[in-house]
Amino acid sequence: QVQLVESGGGLVQPGGSLRLSCAASGSAFSSYAVGWYRQAPGKQRELVAVIGRDGTISYADSVKGRFTISRDNAKNTMYLQMNSLKAEDTAVYYCWRTGLWGQGTQVTVSS
């Protein structure tokens, strides 16, 4: 059974950095579009960043220049490097592959 497992969330001060990881078991990332979504309390889930099957990368305007998505196909792992974090980045972050979701990891940005 294919599973996506996120890690790397936590509490960080404004201006700090975190790196999220998403490991896929039983499936390869390379054949699918993959990405990160987030959901803040009381808000809808929103796209943060995505890598298309052709390698094209897109970011939400709110994270451009601060977040970087990448994947290591050999390790079946995807990453989200988050820099210059703001309070409004606080949310549960979900790893996504076409047709599949991870369980989510909490990111809290607070002083």
Image (spheres, helix red, strand yellow):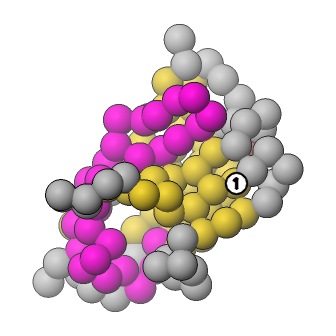
84 in relation to 52, above or below: below
Instruction: Classify mark 1: helix, strand or loop.
Output: strand
Q: Is residue 50 above or below residue 14?
A: above
Q: Position of residue 9 (x, y in %)?
A: 32, 56
The image quadrant of residue 108 is bottom left
- Looking at the rendering, which quadrant does residue 90 occupy? bottom left
Q: Is residue 93 left or right of residue 26?
A: left
In this image, 63 relative to 70: left or right? Answer: left
Q: Which residues are magenta?
A: 82-109
Furthest residue to the top?
1
- Specify whether 57 is left or right of 59: right
Please tell me which residue is depicted at 41% across the width and 85% down the height of the picture: 84
Q: Quadrant of residue 38?
A: bottom left
Where is the C terminus found, in terms of image quarters?
bottom left
Which residue is painted at 61% across and 19% down in the image?
A: 26
* Residue 45 x, y percent position in the rendering: 37, 52
- The answer, for residue 69, to whether it is visible in the render is yes
Q: Magenta segment: does it hold 96?
A: yes
Q: Nearer the viewer, residue 93 or 28?
A: 93
Instruction: Let me know if residue 93 appears in the view.
Output: no
Disc 1 marks a residue whose amino acid type is Ile
Up/down of 63 relative to 57, above or below? below
Pointer 1 residue: 51
Q: Is residue 62 left or right of residue 68?
A: left
Depth check: give the residue in front, 91 or 6.
Answer: 91
